[in-house]
């Protein structure tokens, strides 16, 4: 037999906002890294070896920045989903309480 399900909706709702902070940190780190990398320019040089290095690695570096941007977005989405889940739990609890009160009132009356 199951012991049931329990969720701390208030705690979930309160912590859901943390993901906005995580997303902002991710954005700040990405901007700082990108700024520093742009300031150094093409550190591998423009000779044949540097050109080959760039051909092999620049595209991968660009994809890494895209993933960081994706991570920022996903962190925000996770926070939203947690907030929505907390609201859903609260709604279900209210509905259940109202139904129990309704049945209880009918039994007493």
Image (tube, grey):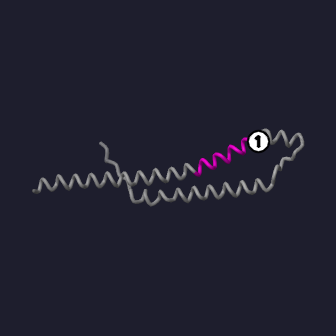
Q: Quadrant of residue 53?
A: top right
Residue 64 in the magenta stretch? The answer is yes
Report the residue at 84% width, 47% height from top: 44
Our reading of the magenta stretch's main secondary structure is helix
- The residue at which mark 1 appears reads as 57
Say which of 8 and 61 sits in front: 61
| Left or right for 2, reference 62 | left
Q: Is residue 73 above or below residue 24?
A: above
Q: Quadrant of the N terminus?
A: top left
Residue 98 percent location from the top left of the image: 24, 55
Question: Which residues make up the magenta segment?
Answer: 57-72
Residue 79 percent location from the top left of the image: 49, 53
| Left or right for 39, reference 96 | right
Report the residue at 30% width, 54% height from top: 93
Report the residue at 57% width, 55% height from top: 23
Q: Residue furthest right?
A: 47
| Left or right for 68, reference 54 | left
Q: Quadrant of residue 12?
A: bottom left
Q: How many neighbours does mark 1 have within 10 angstroms: few (below 14), some (14-19), or many (20 or more)?
A: few
Residue 103 in the magenta stretch? The answer is no
Residue 83 percent location from the top left of the image: 44, 54
Element class at badge 1: helix
Q: Quadrant of residue 30?
A: bottom right
Q: Residue furthest left?
A: 109
Q: Quadrant of the C terminus?
A: bottom left
Residue 11 percent location from the top left of the image: 42, 59
The mark tally for this picture is: 1
Report the residue at 73% width, 41% height from top: 59
């Amino acid at each position: 037999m199951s012991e049931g399900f329990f969720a701390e909706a208030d705690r979930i709702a309160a912590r859901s906002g943390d993901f906005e902070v995580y997303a902002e940190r991710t954005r700040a780190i990405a901007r700082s890294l990108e700024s520093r990398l742009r300031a150094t320019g093409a550190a591998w040089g423009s000779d044949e070896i540097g050109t080959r290095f760039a051909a092999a690695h620049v595209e991968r570096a660009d994809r890494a920045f895209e993933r960081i941007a994706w991570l920022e977005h996903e962190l925000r989405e996770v926070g939203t989903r947690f907030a929505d889940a907390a609201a859903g739990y609260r709604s279900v609890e209210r509905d259940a309480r109202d139904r129990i009160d309704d049945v209880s009132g009918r039994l007493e009356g």
